[in-house]
Amino acid sequence: MKQFLSFVKKEFYHIFRDKRTMFILLGMPIAQIIIFGFALTNEVKNAKIAILDHSKDAVTASLITEIESSRYFEIEESLSSDKEIEAVFHKGIVKLVMVIPAHFGEDLQHFNKAQIQLIADATDPNVANQLTNYASAIVMDYQKRITYERKLPYTINTEMRMLYNPQMKGAYNFVPGVMAMVLLLVCTMMTAITIVREKETGTMEILLVSPVKPIMVVIAKAIPYLLLSTINIFSILILSVFVLEVPINGSITLLLGVSILFILVSLALGLLISAATETQQTAMFISLIALFLPTVMLSGFMFPVENMPTPLRVVSNIIPAKWYYNIVKSVMIKGLGVSAIWKELLVLTGMLLFFLILAIKKFKIRLA
Amino acid sequence: MREVKAITTNKLTKQFGDFTAVDAISFEVNKGEIFGFLGANGAGKTTAMRMLCGLSLPTSGEATVAGLDVYKENEKIKRSIGYMSQKFSLYDDLTVKENMQFYGGIYGKSNAFIKEKTAFILDHLHLQKEANALVKSLPLGWKQKLAFSVAVFHEPEIVFLDEPTGGVDPVTRREFWNMIYTAAANGTTVFVTTHYMDEAEYCDRVSIMVDGRIDALDTPKGLKEKYNASSMDEVFLQLARKATRAAD
Amino acid sequence: MSAISVKNIIKTYGKKKQKVTALNDISFDVNEGEIFGIIGPDGAGKTSLFRILTTLLLADSGSATVDGLDVIKDLKEIRKKVGYMPGRFSLYQDLTVEENLQFFATIFNTSINENYELIKDIYVQIEPFKNRRAGKLSGGMKQKLALSCALIHRPSVLFLDEPTTGVDAVSRKEFWEMLKGLKAQGITILVSTPYMDEARLCDKVLLLQKGKVLSINTPDGVIKDFENPLMAVKAKGMLPLLEKIKAMDIVKDAYPFGEYHHVVMKKEENVEQLKSNLTKADLKEFEIKRVEADIEDCFIQLMKEE
């Protein structure tokens, strides 16, 4: 036991003395949450639009006010002719032009029907899509209201409701993703690197020629990263609750429990990589390319798994992060309990055992 | 024109913080001379050599290498010198030929020059058959000889050799020194460090650094007489034992 | 019982086409309490041999025991008993001197105090720097620390793979003094070195070249086996002198050796011939004397005979 503790102590010295790496490890989750939360948001906020109003009546004026008062849009310019549309797009600031035809108000009043044209700069199709959706939503809203005010019969109300995420916040999607990513990076890459470093510097030779059991080396190396990762989970959760206002709807204990399970899977993967590689460089490449990229691409965090072609969907099943991502979404966002995630838990436990056994089997007691 | 010395230094000093690694050394190396640069680990050899190669700026003092000033003309110095160390010399994953082409290339030599010189070296070292073999497949002794040939490939005025024969077998070690002699006879100045004291005897003149200073500089014969010693080994031990600092 | 016994060890690397034989049928025995030197240049196979004996590598064939224990079967037992200092500096550079020693003490299930007597003479020299990171030590001090760490569990056999490579002459002398001290405490030491002059300091040496044993003997024994007369010659203009000597057919071999050239004669009666030949040549500052062979002379001859 003393052997073991002194080993763990040594590992902590390594981590604490490499201040830069430690800073990156602890700062990374914070930076990622902030970047995803504020910079990379895919919500529309204060988008600049232009309006070409051929009608200029009381109805259009109130519609324009409606648009202006929404937090999504800001009216950059009011155009006076169709020719100006192209010019305003060329300037690059305005991404959407709303064209209101002549006699808009009259048409609406007399025929209960009027048209609006939305022209978007589709060089970025996602943005164009979102802007037109938001704009039509506002118009719909407005239309609904005036219809209601007039108390006309036969009005059909279509109502949409966003479940669990009423404001369609991106944060609900990326917080679980960032958690999976950070844990994977810290645990898998760092454990792999630290073991391989001992091989590179030659200290592994001395450790092997000592009574220390290989399994002890491995566990002692993993413990500091388990701890670091737990700190990271806390900082991510605190940031998401208090800064991004993403609530934790389910049980915190359960959330921490599954996170530790995922950490263990990642650690086991790191060990497996370290057993198979000889240099820190290869260990890092394998961690990044074989694990990190698929996690980002296939776990469902960037691109929904449901929309992937079948082969990719099948492949996504062997990615531990996918299962963890699903669990976190269920527990944290939907507030579900163990009964809803038992399948995922089972898969992760299976993966843990598989990787661990493989890693221990592969750990060499000799040099070659 | 006055004969220019290969290397001159005058009170050359390098400080790292309050640690004086090289402490006001002054010496001259003649053209075509084999100059042994000895000292214990941590005496300041490497630091001094780096300044002369233009890799590190002195804190104070003066120095010229091939008539060029180490402060202002360090880029020119790099073109006039060759360098070989025990650790880094050749690319293991390139072939013998490719290594020579690469070094010829980075010194801006013409293709014709590279071709001719490569053929000459391969012939000289009896390596024609191995021209297209990866360097890592060669025995260590051959590698060291090849590394030396590459260091003088661009026909530099001065070649710096940092422990070139470490770990080499005694026969190859002598062959290596034979190459050094030939280079010196052709007018190349050789500046060499070594831990083998018998090799110090092969040098025209030897300097011994202790605690950042040059404590002795003479021919091996002169040094042995002065210190009343039968071998360079004894001279070295007498001087190096006086060292008070133990930093690297 | 031998402290180390090696029988017919063969070790090769690589696949069929580019097979490299690192050790070619090596056998030797080391007695308890001996300093046994493996002398050979880089690439001779020293490190492979050390790794096989310290259970880190499996030989292709042959057998070996350390302290009576088989290097394959009794892996765990051997790992408790031997001390090993690999070729490159293998301590934790970011830990202090004391932390390194403490760490290695605990992984060997012992403490610094328990075996302090054994390492005392070595450790006191680095104790003033015990709070310094190992990476910031000088070459000589790193070595002393590495040796202290290898000794901390009082091993019965100590393996030192090229402990003096790249170390200056003063530190080398000090290091060999320390080994003598350890020998006096009854520890068997297997040490390798590329420096031929260190052979003299061993009780027994094995000269190794390209995986083959050139000779196993006491240093004096190796020298005694050198039968040809050996002359040391010097004069002004050493390079032309060497050419001149090499051209003579009474000379078996000639090569630079420190300030002299060493000349190996074919027969006893050639000695006088060489003297008179060279005297006739009217050389300046001419000197000739008969010398006893050095280990290096022996190594060169054995290498050339191979």
Image: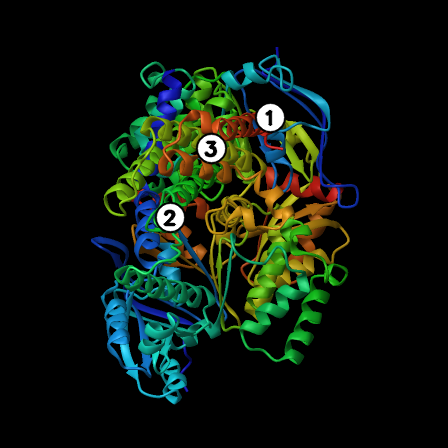
Q: CA distance from mark 2 to mark 3?
A: 41 Å
User: SS at mark 2?
Assistant: loop
Check chain identity for marks 2 and 3: say if they share one. Answer: yes
Q: Which residue is mark 3?
A: A267
Chain of the residue displaying label 2? A
Q: Earlier in the sequence, mark 1 or mark 2?
A: 2
Q: CA distance from mark 1 to mark 2?
A: 52 Å
User: SS at mark 1?
Assistant: helix
Chain of the residue displaying label 1? A
Residue type highlighted by circle 1: Lys
Choose between B5 and A276: the one closer to the eye.
Answer: A276
To which quarter of the image does residue A76 belong? Answer: bottom left
Q: Which residue is mark 1?
A: A361
Q: Are marks 1 and 3 in contact (CB under 8 Å)?
A: no
Choose between A77 and A9: the one closer to the eye.
Answer: A77
Check chain identity for marks 1 and 2: say if they share one. Answer: yes
Check chain identity for marks 1 and 3: say if they share one. Answer: yes
Residue type highlighted by circle 2: Arg
Q: Which residue is mark 2?
A: A161
Q: Is residue C186 above or below residue A275?
A: above
